[in-house]
Amino acid sequence: MSFQRRAYDMDLGRRDHTRWLGSSGRYSTQGFAYSDIPNQLLRINSLEGSLAFSGAVLTGVTDVSPVGGTVTVTGSPTYTATDAGLNNAPSFTIVAASSVIAPNVNRASIRFVAAVVYRSSAVVAQFLFDGVAASNRFFAIMHANGVIQVSTAAALTVPTGEPSVGRKIYVAPNDNATQVRWNPSAGGAWQSIGTQPVGSASGLGLSLAASYLGANFGARLAFFMACSSVPSAPQLASLEAKLITDFG
């Protein structure tokens, strides 16, 4: 493991650690943009205009990554224009007989995912994302016992304070080296919860905020990013700080 990667993994909870401001004793997010993260396969960000709507219904989703890939909305997911649980950012929620699917993302290429959701129930399992079929899946699900289960078969540490209702940020490399990071609530400290291997996912397609069966929905999603490489330690630190600034 590189020194840079170890340095990132040893940072156990600083909220604003994008750029050190010397004698002021703090960090700044100034100058960082989500587009600075390299090798993006998909980026959905409600604060960058990703979500189209009609009233309280989500009608379309735009991939704002350089790929500009297809995202398909079926049924009538709920659109929330000002989500108080996500620092008043817009969000969407999957409901029965609905889905938001990025059909062309190559699951085998994914080495990094970041997601911001509002967990609406502590007693019902809720997906962050999943594949689109029963085989070759790539997923992360928040269980009612607090476990964050991932398709890579990693045994992640149960985050302190889980399960609980509230804003969750998941920053997850799958390179068998870099720590998966979890932020459990607005004002909460970052937690390093283990590493995960590459896994064996293959095929195309990701289902957002619900399982491939359209089940275990309910998490309100405002941000999702998938990349084919793990960002550098400074980029990861910048991303963490930016997500806190934008989504609480």
Image (cartoon, rainbow, N blue to C red):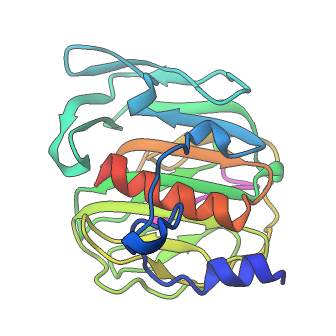
Q: Nearer the viewer, residue 176 or 190?
A: 190
Q: Up-down: is 19 above or below 211? A: below
Which of the two residues, 120 or 159, is positioned nearer the viewer here?
A: 159
Among the 4 quarters of the image, the one containing residue 119? bottom left
User: Which residue: 26% across, 48% down?
Assistant: 86
Image point 58% across, 24% down: which residue?
71
Give the residue displayed 79% in from the left and 68% down from the top: 199
Q: Quick one: which residue is furthest to the left in this view?
A: 84
Measuring from the top left, give residue 128's x and y in whole percent. Answer: 47, 54
Front-lying residue, 191 or 21: 21
Screen quadrant of the C terminus:
bottom left
Residue interval drawn in magenta: 133-141
Residue 127 appears at what percent x and percent y? 45, 56
Count of numbered tags: 0
Query: Which x, y percent locates residue 122?
Result: 24, 70
- Is 242 left, or right, of 43 in this rendering? left
User: Taking the image as drawn, is residue 24 in sight?
Assistant: yes
User: Which quadrant of the rendered structure holds the N terminus?
Assistant: bottom right
The vertical placement of 174 against 163, above or below, is above
> Main SS type for the magenta part?
loop
